[in-house]
Amino acid sequence: MREIKAPNKLIFNNKSIFLAGSIEMGRAIDWQTQVVNALKNEKVTILNPRRDDWDSSWEQIIGNKQFREQVEWELEAQEKANKIAMYIDPETKSPITLLELGLFAHTGKIVVCCPNGFYRKGNVDIVCYRYGIRQVNSLEELVGELKNNS
C-alpha cells in the first residue's frame, strides 16, 4: 500500500482509492487513518486529502494559493482514482462531501458509508439509490468493501 496525502504529487496505478468524506477542519473522526491502517497490506494507492499541514486560518477563496491547491488536488484525485470511498460522519454537516457525492455520483466508482444519524441521510440514500451507488452501514463494512474490490 502506498499513501499519497494532499498536496503531494498524485501518482495513479491500476488500483487507487480516494478517501472522500467528512473532515470538517478536524471535527470529524480521523477515519482516513483507520482505513489506511486497515489496507496496509493491500496492493493499492490511497489518495488521502487529510492534509498534515492544514491551517484552518486559510481563507477559503479561489485567490488563496494553498486552499486552491487543496481543492484542485482533491478534484483531480477523484477524477482519476479507480474507486472513491466516502464516509459521512453523522456528527458533521459535511457540505463538501455532499458536493463531491453529487459531482461523482454518475461515475460508478463510489462506495458510500452514511450511518444513521446523519442529518441528510435520506438525501444521500436517494442519490445512492438513483445512481446505483453501493452503500454500507459502518466503517468496518467500508474497509471490507475496499479490500474485496481493491
Image: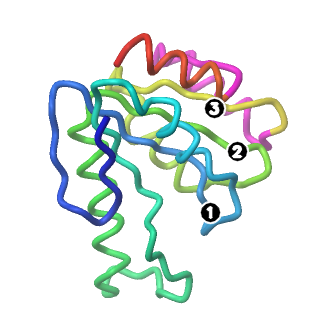
Q: For mark 3, give the secondary structure.
A: helix
State yes or no: residue 70 in magenta. Answer: no
Real-space Cα separation, disc 1 to disc 3, in angstroms: 18 Å
Q: Residue at x 27, y 60 (%)?
A: 73
The local crowd at label 3, few if under 14, some if 14 to 19, many if 20 or more residues have their Cα within 10 Å, is many
Quadrant for the C terminus in the image: top left
Q: Earlier in the sequence, mark 1 or mark 3?
A: 1
Nearest the eye: 98 or 139: 139
Q: State which quadrant residue 39 falls in.
A: top left
State yes or no: residue 132 in magenta. Answer: yes
Q: Residue at x 44, y 17 (%)?
A: 147
Q: Residue at x 64, y 41 (%)?
A: 88
Q: Which mark is residue 89?
A: 2
Residue 1 located left or right of residue 84? left
Nearest the eye: 134 or 50: 50
Tags 2 and 1 touching, CB below 8 Å: yes
Q: Position of residue 5 (x, y in %)?
A: 35, 57
Q: Residue at x 37, y 36 (%)?
A: 104
Which portion, as a residue range, is magenta? 118-138
Real-space Cα separation, disc 2 to disc 3, in angstroms: 12 Å
**To which residue does mark 1 refer?**
24
- Residue 2 versus residue 122 in the image, above or below: below
Q: Earlier in the sequence, mark 2 or mark 1?
A: 1
Amino acid type indicated by mark 2: Asp
- Residue 26 versus residue 119 in the image, above or below: below
